[in-house]
Image (spheres, rainbow, N blue to C red):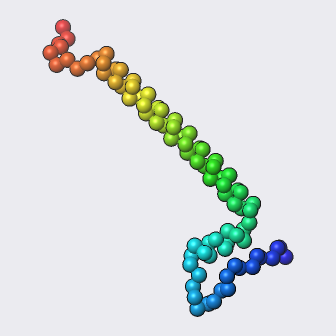
Amino acid sequence: MGGERSPLPININPIIEIPLLHKALILIKDLGVPFLAGSVVNAALAGIIVYFIAHRILLSRQQFKKNLAWQRRIKPYNPGYTVK
């Protein structure tokens, strides 16, 4: 059932432990090109979404600060002013 696994590029000796990164690379190789293509698409979409969300937040923050500064210029604090 299913396809055969690709042969490992190294001889596995149980005495010598394979580094974690090498194990991960072997697993990714076994998963194949469709997995890698899907991973690239998902990462690109996530990056684009995060970029636009951060961009919108920064623009709204900048606009809020501009409005706040504009309001302060129109209504400056005047300690000598009294209401009659």
Residue 25, x across and y down, in percent: 64, 71
| Up-down relation of residue 20 to residue 45 (above or below) | below
| Up-down relation of residue 53 to residue 66 (above or below) | below
| Up-down relation of residue 27 to residue 79 (above or below) | below
Q: Residue at x 77, y 76 (%)?
A: 5
Q: Residue at x 60, y 75 (%)?
A: 22
How many circles with numbers are drawn on the protein? 0
Residue reaching furthest to the right: 1
- The one of 2 and 37 positioned closer to us in this rendering: 37
Residue reaching furthest to the left: 80
Q: Residue at x 58, y 48 (%)?
A: 47
Direction from residue 7 to residue 39 in the image, left or right: left
Q: Quadrant of the N terminus?
A: bottom right
Residue 30, x across and y down, in percent: 72, 71
Q: Residue at x 48, y 32 (%)?
A: 59
- The one of 11 and 75 positioned closer to us in this rendering: 11
Direction from residue 82 to residue 33 in the image, left or right: right
| Up-down relation of residue 67 to residue 37 (above or below) | above
Q: Quadrant of the C terminus?
A: top left
Residue reaching furthest to the bottom: 15
- Quadrant of res 23: bottom right
- Quadrant of res 79: top left
Residue 58, x across and y down, in percent: 46, 36
- Quadrant of res 16: bottom right
